[in-house]
Image (tube, rainbow, N blue to C red):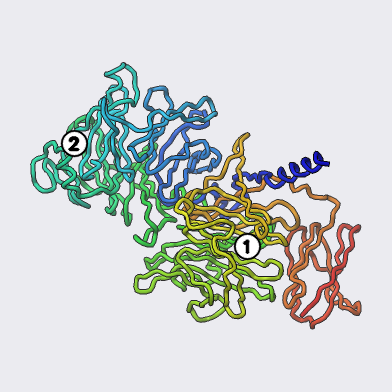
Amino acid sequence: MRKFWIIIFLISSLQLNAQEIYRIDQQPEVQVNDVLLASPFAGGINSAQIETIDLTGDGIEEWIIWDINSRQLLVFKKGGETFTHLPELSYAFPTDIRGFLVLADFDGDGKKDLFTSTALGIKAYKNTSTGTQISWTIAQNFLKLDGSGNIQTNNLDTPLIQDLDGDGDLDLVIFNFAGGDYMEFYRNTSVERKGTADIDGFAFGENHWGNFEFCGCGDFSFGKTCSGSPLAKLDLEDENKRIEHAGGHSILFQDFNGDGIDDLVLGRDECSVLYFLPNSGSSIDPIFTSFTNSLPDYGDFPEFPIFHSGQLIDEDLIISLNTSEIAFNYKMDFASSIVKIDNQGNADYDFLQDQMIDLGENARPVFFGNKSQGELLVTANTLMENGQVESMLSKFKMIDGKLIEQVGEYVNLSALDLLDAQYINFRDKAGQTNLLASGIRYQNNIPSQAIYDLSKAENTPVSVAGYAPQRGDYLQFFNYENVDLMLVASQNGSLDLYEIDFSTYTAILKETDFLGFSDNPANRNLSVAVIEKPNPDLYTVDQNGVLNKIENFMQSSTRSDVFVQIGNQTLPTRLGRNAWIATIKPAFEGPTDLVLGTRGGGLIYLSSTENPNPGTDEYKIKIYPNPNDGPIKVITSKASIGTLVNSLGQELLSNIQIPANLEVEIQASFLTPGLYILILESEGKFRETRKIWMR
């Protein structure tokens, strides 16, 4: 008997801890302005640091985009002007990329290696890939001086890592870490020391590389300091006394005027435009004496509200935002944050982002319907025509498994002047549909969280007794055992459970730190989604980007990771610093798909790998709501013909065409309260009846 119970326990444990595995998908198809998007579910882009590397072994380099704002890394295959998202390859990169990303071959083996920011300076990974098997090995935890300590860098900078002296190893140029207003050159000594290219030691830095100081936007001092003193070597004590700027810089060093000598394109975090400094010296010992805001052949630099950087790829100049700031603070258009300029001066302001869903910033999706038919509504912070950043709601209609963007705003959400708005549509236990919006509003430049009843004409917030909204609260409503409940996921990582009465707008706190989610700096930006059923499940995600699931969460607090299928591996998700979850169910029983909104203003689609195992001869019918006081909604698993009769058998409607797995609404406003019968027939061999009560 003891052995029997042990076996039962083991089987139960395996079921409780069964992995839920998803595939990162570019389906369903998405159509915008009558055009199918090439990479609809790439996740959006806010601040793109763009590099290139051959990851697939075909001799053609993929485009790598590190978004410092959303903390997402995206990989694209470029074919002509079409970019195809390769999401699985993102999971082949190290998980500790921070600040900047530079790809450059440091050992001459023909494979680009990886450099990124660390608290100690610059961390380097060696590319140890073989064929299509991608791998990275730590080469240096931090770049260091010969016989000395680490080279300190600002993680907001994008350093110049390039062979400047022509000896075959990579040298380094950064902005001074203490003052931040001039450049320092660090010569790589590996070839001189051991005859092979490496990154195991650099000579002490030479300050004022290029013979200038960057005093401010549009203000350079050539041949002297910003205070007018002669350029001279400063000791550390002097540097620390004169910190003038420690923000971010971008550096691009290429020959732009055709004289065979590399020139400089600089960006600085608070400046709205890039600067071109022609080089009258050499690549190793440059001399800059002037600057302009235009580039030979490419024309005037575009203006951005804040920090941006430039990259030269295939003779195209790519300029993109490079900031961790939120859109509201600087009125940034994150839906159009990349500009491509060719060497004829032609600019493309829709570059790359027009091939994906990119609505701006902080996309919060909600889905109504099923995998075949329904509506996907997404709120996102968008730069409006009046120059303000506000939340706007976009609508995509699911038709036969394809998402088609609908023109116009579904509800006039932008009239509320909210930021980070959440759209809520919840049918309570009384059968009433509650349409709400929750978001941040500003009054006298002071932000606060507010809730609006969208069914009311006046644009004034509603007060919920017993609940005090906090900035960034994300709400989920659900019904359990005929009680309406509200989950409040806070930005500090905590989760609270309330009982809610919509008729009086009253909330009763049932439990704080619900399911063990409490205030924790390591788990900020909590977001949740409920799968409603008699024993509901809960999905959760926070700033770590790892998706979790709690099955039957009203009775259990056991969390399990949700995995994605990457080749023959299953790995935890990497969803960036913010994500919001929507669920897409099948018409009947079966696995649920997930749509994740991102800080980048886009969406990620996760398709369940679970086999739905449909019964081909099973005839399934769903009629709701029931009882009913409005349209009757019907879904059947097979194409059907319906007939509606009253309790006396009198035929009221006939030949009602119901396609398989698609919701059909039967208008019932003419029906008086009472009992009705819906007769359904399919394929000449199925005949079912269902009772419908009209109120």
Horizontal placement of 595 versus 600: left or right? right
Name the amino acid, label 1: Glu
Residue 32 shows in this picture: no
Question: Quadrant of residue 139 in the image?
Answer: top left
- Nearest to the observer: residue 576 or residue 520: 520
Lower position in the chain sequence, tag 2 or tag 1: 2
Which of discs 2 and 1 lies nearer the camera? The answer is 2
* Kind of element beneath mark 2: strand
- Rendered residue at 54%/76% (across/down): 453
> Which quadrant, please, contains the N terminus?
top right
* 238, above or below 273, in the image: above
Q: Residues within 10 Å of mark 2 (few under 14, many from 20)?
A: many
Question: Quadrant of residue 161 in the image?
Answer: top left
* 632, above or below 166, in the image: below
Query: Where is residue 115 shown, x and y percent of the image?
Result: 38, 35
Name the amino acid, label 2: Asn
Q: Which mark is residue 375?
A: 1
Horizontal placement of 21 versus 292: left or right? right
* Kind of element beneath mark 1: strand
Q: Residues within 10 Å of mark 1 (few under 14, many from 20)?
A: many
- Nearest to the observer: residue 371 or residue 106: 106
